[in-house]
Image (cartoon, grey):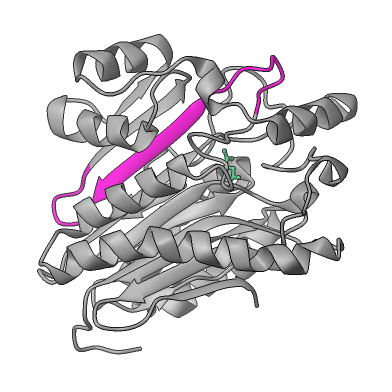
Amino acid sequence: MNATPLRPVIAIHGGAGTMSRDSAAAAQQAAYHDALRAVLLPPQQLLAAGGSALDAVTLAVELLEDCPLFNAGHGAVFTHDETHELDAAVMDGATLRAGAIACVSRVRRPVRAARAVMEDSDHVLFAGAGAEEFARRQGLEMVEPSYFSTEARREQLKRALGSDRAVLDHDGAALAFRTPAPPLEERGKMGTVGAVAFDAHGNVAAATSTGGMTNKQPGRIGDSPLIGAGTYADNATAAISCTGTGEMFIRLAAAYDICARMRYAGLPLDLAAELVVQEALPAIGGRGGLVAVDRHGNVSMPFNTEGMYRGYARVGEAAHTAIFR
Ligand code: ASP
């Protein structure tokens, strides 16, 4: 752990899960590394130019939302009713201001709507029709719900419908229909996207965006838009963005719990995050991981699955991306 301020840094995740047994998966790894790197570079440049952590995480998540490889924005999973319901949140560690939206199906970039809730309303969380109306009034780009649909996700829903359960991101995915296969096993992968950043002014911020879980019941809201569960940022401790079985992250107030362990028990970020991801979550059946950055700029990216799409880019250094341990 480094106690002196490090250079600004952006860290991102694109979902956690188990390794694909499909041999084509190895060949696909490069595509995921390339996508992660492409997402890291613009916010890294923004931070290098003195930009804020808040702008860096918003930009990173927007780019992840636009990339169909990840379950957020375009490429989001389907609900049981073959609709899309997207959730997103953003939090500014400098002011503890936060904004979130849940259950929207027409806002092209949900993270922008979350940011607008934070900056242009007196509230923290809008859901459903009211959230969409708010986004429209803010002049945000609206799309037909079909914009979010991809064939791969439809196949995934068909498989999940047979199981009668809500499944994590690609849980119902038909690898056979996706050629070549992605490196993380679609049936065990979480797909929320998220970002945390530490800027040159010493501020931290976090943002998270998701399509939720395939075959989820309409109206179900996960941890991603709930401040303290899937997303949290406080300059006093750290910024956190989670991915995984949302219900367990909600029950533990997982993101806030990491900050609380740091603040009240004096734990360093790495240890606080490890205890939540490797002990507290598994104890109630929670699977997934997170990216975090503390107030000194230290990055932590723990997960309790076989892999997690992740990466970070510190100003002045090459970007690092990884999928497995
Ligand atoms: N945490 C998300 C949710 O429960 C799912 C995910 O990370 O894939 O909505």
Q: Nearer the viewer, residue 203 or 106?
A: 106
Residue plotted at (21% across, 52% down): 54
Query: Is residue 305 something that shows in the picture?
Result: no
Q: How many marks?
A: 0
- Which quadrant is the C terminus positioned in? bottom right
Toward which corner of the image does residue 211 lie, by quadrant? Answer: top right
- In the rendered structure, the answer to whether residue 59 lies left or right of residue 223 reads left
Give the magenta part as a residue range. 78-97
- In the rendered structure, the answer to whether residue 189 lies left or right of residue 212 reads right
Residue 27 against residue 271 in the figure, above or below: above
Residue plotted at (55% across, 48% down): 249
- In the rendered structure, the answer to whether residue 92 lies left or right of residue 1 reads left
Residue 202 against residue 239 in the figure, above or below: below
Q: Position of residue 289 (x, y in %)?
A: 57, 61
- Check residue 140 for magenta coloring: no
**Which quarter of the frame holds ligand 1?**
top right
Residue plotted at (65% across, 26% down): 78
Q: Position of residue 170 (x, y in %)?
A: 72, 43
- In the rendered structure, the answer to whether residue 153 lies left or right of residue 149 reads right
